[in-house]
Image (cartoon, rainbow, N blue to C red):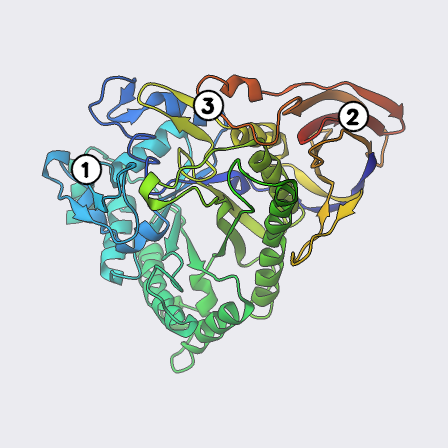
Amino acid sequence: MSSEVSVSGGETIDRISENIYGHFAEHLGRCIYGGIWVGDDNRVETNDGIRMDTVELLRDLEMPVLRWPGGCFADDYHWEDGVGPRDERPRRRNLWWTQGRENVPEESNQFGTDEFLRLCQLLETDPYIAVNVGSSTPQEALDWIEYCNYDGDTELADRRRENGQEEPYGVKYWGIGNENWGCGGRFAPDEYADEYRRFANYFNGFDNLMNAESTEFIACGHLTDDWNRVFFENLNGGMEFGPGTFLGMGSPFNLLDHFSVHRYYQAGGDVDFSDDQYYKMFARAEKIAGDIDRAAETISDFVPKDEIGIIVDEWGAWHPEAKNDNGLEQENTVRDAVATAGVLDLIHDRADVVSMANIAQTVNVLQCLVQTDEEDAWRTPTFRVFELYENHVGQTALETSVDTDVESFEAEDHDVPMVSASASKGDGELFVTASNRRHDEAETITVDAGTEATVESATVLFDGKDIREYSTKDNAESFASSDLSVDDEGDGAVTFDAPPASVVGLTLSE
């Protein structure tokens, strides 16, 4: 079988933000407790309780941004429970998630704000904090941003210093709620618009008067157009009876920098799935493209282009095996990883509107990048895709078309192209990624770069791997990339054979 990938070097989309390769760590199962935080457990090397084997693996990804503490957990979390001496912190219930593998909805608060921000310092990543809207108040949220970001002489700033952080953390990204149409309060869209405006108004006031660092605020969106439209209409309408320029407030949309949507997908089990279900998961992952496009269209009706970015701050495979009573753990297979490549390709195609994306979740939970046990940490196949795709980061996305066979499935909204691809350029180099989704056949792929170029390198993931194979401590290194043989046809055309269910990275010099 054969396919052709055509790259339009003169048709640029936009810069691929580093934040598209963001991550998400929620207080859920073994993501935090056991995966990131082990406290006084000396079976692994730690930095004040943070396990360093996990940190070292995540450092390899040059992680740009990390979202925390949720997720649904965030809207039943009160941040002051998690600061100060750890032996004095209260143990609290959380209505939505349990910690560890036992189905007990209790939070020890041993890992809190300072521990999270210390983790971000170790990873050299930007923190993204989701505040509690569903069961909290603007005052509690405002106190949190003051604790993190204010350098003056107030009780909260002094409390941060007493807890070991002299300088402000400078947290840039603040999510005002999470899934507020569901676990975050079951707000109707007009109700959430009122709550968002109220919280963001105080955040914005702090930002204008007391904050030396720039902060950006994120609203929670929905997958339905009507919900999002009503939110924007009511956010705007709330200023109807007051002067928009009072105290420099301006448009209500000045209170909003990003708008988030979430998308999970599955078909069959994590390793127990039919061949049809193998392909159907790609069809369901394709829905992310529509989520982004519809949100962008709605936003464009209210504000000029580029004023509000779209964040896909939860996405990935969520298989039926991942349940609360096992800490939402599932096997991480080659199928999951190949689907990830396709999602990243479609996000590159929308680099002009997507400002961030955060795969769920970082360690042990759902489609994690790192797994741990009591003594070791290791990479998943999805980690390998993120590692391969790093060459796209910061480059300019190019228009890319793929001529390939397409499979259709009854009752699925999207067809499945057998090859997915994207391309970017920067510093005299062109980087192309292409995945062969056929599980049983190699695909001969020709890449037409659209300009004279020579091959610098070519690597392939999952050559010889079965689509149901998943990572364990013993086999994790076998999912690493290997060199791929390519034929340089001249005039910027390159041909190679992509093994079944594989992902290829190709670097060309212009």
Image quadrant holding the C terminus, namely: top right
Q: Is residue 453 visible?
A: no
The numbered mark, 2 or 3, whose residue comes first in the sequence reads: 3
What residue lies at 86% left-to-right and 30% top-to-bottom? 493
Q: Secondary structure at mark 3?
A: loop
Determine which quarter of the picture holds residue 51: top left
> Which of the two discs, 1 and 2, sits closer to the camera?
2
Nearest to the observer: residue 464 or residue 89:
464
- x%, y% of residue 441? 75, 30
Residue at the far left: name it.
88
Residue at 57 percent of width and 61 percent of height: 295
The image quarter containing residue 48 is top left
Mark 2 or mark 3, which is nearer to you? 3
Q: Amino acid at mark 3?
A: Thr
Q: Image height check: is 194 above or below 44? A: below
Using residue 320 as the reference point, say whether residue 2 is left or right of it: right
Task: Give the mark, 3 or 1, whose residue is nearer the N terminus.
Answer: 1
Q: How far is disc 1 from disc 2 in space, using C-alphas?
A: 58 Å
Of residues 215 and 275, the one nearer the viewer is 275
Task: Write down the residue under mark 3.
Answer: 472
Q: Which residue is mark 1?
A: 161
**Label 3 neighbour load within 10 Å: few <14, some 14-19, many 20+:** some
27 or 47, which is in the foreground? 27
